[in-house]
Amino acid sequence: MLAVETALTGSPLVAGNSVHLLVDGPAAYAALFAAIANARDHVHLETYLLADDEVGRRLGNLLVARRKHGVSVRILYDGIGSVGTSAAFFDRLRSAGIEIQAFHPLDPLQHPKIWELNNRDHRKLTIVDGRVGFTGGMNISDVYARSSLSAPRGIPDLHSRWRDTQIQIEGPAVAELQKLFLAHWREAAPSSASPNPRASYFPTLEPRGEDLVRIVASAGGGDRYEIYNAYLAAVEHARQRIWVTQAYFVPGERFVGALQAAARRGVDVRLHARGLALVLQRTARGGRTHL
């Protein structure tokens, strides 16, 4: 399986990492803000939505404080995802010496395909001093400020308690996250991107744990689908279980077929999508599988 993934994605499997799951916003923000508060060289942050709300302003204050202590800060946000964020919010950060760029901003002449859904930057990355990395599904917004686990059962809450997960990585795999950030930064701001990154962006990273990490990326508007191919290969090679949590589940026939084939060969296949728990099961007749 590992050999197949490497061949399909071209991304290395990196050993020697410490990876921690951060479930919901309170845990994720606590870890993120603590890492930033201890930054000594740089903070690189990439997000789809950077909101001008309590969480966003708290992050902004922290970044401004670190900038005053000589830490360089770069922020890359999506031009559509953060369209509701006030100009004053970003102006305050820029005036403090923070570098800020919009990915595919609202400029139809410069970016004629800005409205295409797959032409956005949905990455959520933060790299601190090239040594600590964060990634996952969370934007910078109040909707993640409360734990989903505290929500009353059966009562949907569209404005808070969003269910999402981040991971915190320490170890050699952080360099792979750094490479992704710098590549998108060069695309968004070619005039401010040096062809030779500062050495401090890639410090020597000693092993911090025993976790194996492969960073697989996708890019909006591109025609490469490494993540999809990696998912498909994992499903096709699974032997024991496939448990999926997914907010938006709109698979093609090949992916559905792979899940069905896995269930038929005895793999425990479960899907949790937007609050609806679904289980792929084999029926008693003919080994057929239904969703």
Image: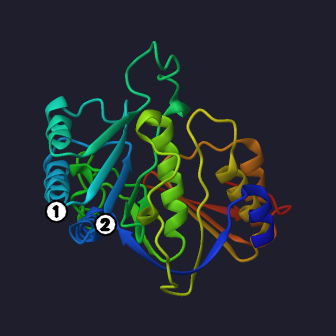
Q: Which residue is mark 1?
A: 69
User: Viewer-nearest of labels 2 and 1?
Assistant: 1
Quarter of the N terminus within the rendering: bottom right
Residue 255, how many percent across, how many down? Answer: 73, 50
Q: Percent position (x, y) of residue 102?
A: 36, 34
| Colouring convention used in this rendered image of the protein | rainbow
Residue 28's tag is 2
Dot 1: within a 10 Å radius of its alpha carbon, few (fewer than 14), some, or many (20 or more) residues? Answer: few
Is the residue marked by circle 2 packed among few (<14), some (14-19), or many (20+) residues within 10 Å? many
Residue 88 in the image: x percent, y percent?
A: 14, 32
**Which residue is depicted at the point 36% across and 70% down?**
22
Residue 153: which quarter of the image?
A: bottom left
Residue farthest right in this picture: 286
Dot 2 falls on a residue whose secondary structure is helix
Amino acid type, residue under disc 1 in the picture? His
Q: Residue at x 53, y 31 (%)?
A: 119
Looking at marks 2 and 1 on the same chain, the residue that comes earlier in the sequence is marked by 2
Q: Residue at the location (22% across, 34% down)? A: 85
Residue 125 visible in the shown view: yes
